[in-house]
Amino acid sequence: MGKRIFFITSGRLCVYHHDGQVGDPIEFTADEDGLTRFSLYLEQPWKDPVYVLVDFVEEEFREEYIPHVFGSDRQALIRTRLNRLFRDATYSTAIHQGRASEGRRDDRMLFTALIRPDLLATWMAQMTKHKTPVAGIYSLPLISRDVVKRLKLEGRYLLLVTLQSSGGLRQTYFQNGELKVSRLAMLPDPGPDRFTSSMLAEVERLRRYLNSLRMLPSDEALDVYVIAPDRVRAEVERHSPTSITARHHVIDIDEAARKVGLRGTAGDRFCDRLFVHLLARRPPANQYAPRSQTRYFGMHQLRRGLIAASVFLLMGGLAWSAATFVDGLGAIEDMNSARKQAAFYRSRYESARARLPATPTESRNMKRVVETVDMLGKFRTSPVPMMQILSSALEGFPEVQLDEIRWRASTDPAASVAELAQTPVVSRSVEPTAPEALALYQVATVRARISPFSGNYREALGTVRRFADRLRALPGVEAVQVESMPLDIGPEASLSGDVRAAGGTGDAVFELRVAIRDVGGRA
Amino acid sequence: MRAGELDWDLLRGSVVLLVVSLVVAGVALAASYHFWNKQETALERERSALLTARSQYQALDDEEDIIATYLPRYVALEAEGIIGREQRLDWIDVLRESARAVQVPRLEYVIAAQRPFETGMLLNVGDYGVYASSMRLDVGLLHEGDLLELLGRLRREVSGLFGVSGCRMMRTDRELRLAPDASNVEAQCVLNFYTIRRSDAAGGGSAS
């Protein structure tokens, strides 16, 4: 993106368009005609930001120390000092140049200002009126620091001398690489014939001035760098050979242009393009414009940011969408492939399946059903095993007569046998389990009596106990409990009788509960 | 830059561009995502179908073995009335024949409605379910052995798979009567006839 440099000198404004190289200027004079033309120029739909470069005699420099503070305090302190130092501090700035080596180590600042704001006012008013995005107002001395650095000029006390198209000789003094003071002297005859002598006279005048201000020790030599056409070198050497007080160095203007990266020629004698190029390439941090005059530049930046964000969003969104869409198309392709493969397998399966015998249901169902029937063998329960166990137990107990048997099959060995049909075989409390882990039991309550009964309860109780023990000893029997005895001799029960009664008149009834493990599938 | 310093005339175009970009990008993203998601879902479905078809094809050898092993048994179980519809008429006929053969003085029966049977076992019967019908027998016996004889005959001759879930036998008199039609023992038994058939509905007749 290009930049525009408005180079303002006394009574003139030159517009330079910079897009890597500096074009020919469009010149406007500070009269009615010039301002009208300038206004028309500003109405053009150029959106490039504007960097104002000024070269005025009326630019002052003051070196001061301020306490080393930060943030808003520092800003306020600088603003106060600027207002105190300059009559009108509209266009002013402060450059930090290090700290004092002693005392409280205050900050050393160079305060500088354009002390005739009216010279800028008409131009700035036009720019504000046309909402021109002014990035800042810079002066040649502020840019000169970059010239010294880019041209690698050396010297503790250094003076940079350039001739500007306004006819002025710009002399900028640096001490230890720091800008100290700058002066624009209007040469009475800036023509090439008289240039060298006029320039050397002005330099000598400034050197004495610096000596008088003690900015330049009288016993130190001043390194004077003149950026001028190469032909000036011989003239300088002839007029003012190197002395104790000054060492003159002439830098060919074209060589200087090449060193700062300016393509093409820098011009005949004037260094305007050199400064314009340096400002366009790298605007210094310090500039003179107040915030109110850079307002449209802020909006210009914001606008550019919004456009960039829009483009990024749009391109990013469309790119992402395109990628997603392509993924979707890939999925369709994969889907068609999968469909074809599935059809292929189905076709192969069907043709192979046709060779197999017809089945009443799917083979997996058939297998499961048959296996389930096998599992249901567990529920082919029958009272035969219990009857066989009771028969075996009764052998050897002829006096025991069975009156009633209540029998049932259940997953619960403690299941009640009171009701036959109401209770399911599988206990409600049983969690679904593996077929091999499900256990079935047969439970029976046997009501019996001892007959004939002699009336000897002791003997009857003994018979019942032996009968129960006999049952317990049989294989497959899980548990035998005597539910009731012929005579309850427990301390909780009441007991009565007639000791004179003859034997054999009563019944010795008892009840047993027997549980056996069912192996299932019996006939 | 503070909001009050903004010049909306200068910014309007870029703000509109940003909004339009947002909308266009958002619509494009939503539309492409919808398209992609739809195709991905369809692709997953097709992949699943492919997996099933491939597995089915690869399992063909197993299926052949299964058919060879289980089809005869399945057909036999169907013929026995264990798979498919209950053979209640056959049960009654066999019951009547058995009572006559064992010469029980009295035999009454009640068959309840068929219900899903909770086996208490973790079984996978696929689309099928296990059902049970309970038959209550009320029978007069000359002696206890006749009951076992009766149940044995039923077991051998009846179509279907059944288990006796409970019985009660009670002597009617302390004195044994020897007449052929005398009931010395009264017995009540509950028999469960198990059948496997296709479930009435999804999850009906759970075997678990």
Image (tube, helix red, strand yellow):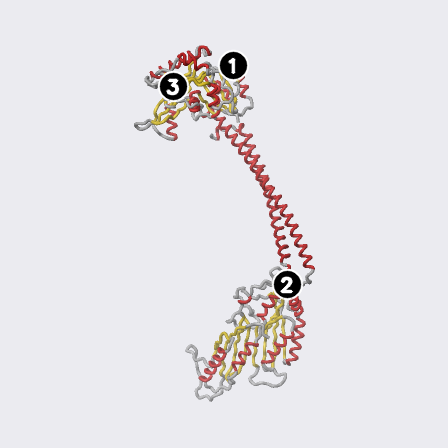
User: Which residue is at 49% across, 76% downward?
Assistant: A480
Image position, residue A396 (x, y; %): 51, 84
Q: Are marks 2 and 3 in contact (CB under 8 Å)?
A: no
Q: Which mark is residue B65?
A: 2
Instruction: Read off the residue under disc 1.
Output: A32
Q: Nearer the viewer, mark 3 or mark 1?
A: 3
Q: Is residue A82 visible?
A: no
The amino acid pointed to by label 3 is: Asp
The amino acid pointed to by label 2 is: Asp
Determine crowd level at label 2: few under 14, some 14-19, many 20+ residues with C-alpha closer than 10 A.
few
The amino acid pointed to by label 1 is: Glu
The one nearer the camera, A188 or B120, is: A188
Q: Nearer the viewer, mark 2 or mark 3?
A: 3
Q: Name above or below for residue B180 compared with residue A420.
A: below
Q: Is residue A479 visible?
A: yes
Determine crowd level at label 1: few under 14, some 14-19, many 20+ residues with C-alpha closer than 10 A.
few
Image position, residue B94 (x, y; %): 66, 75
Instruction: Read off the residue under disc 3.
Output: A223
The Cα atoms of the two marked residues, 3 and 1, are separated by 44 Å
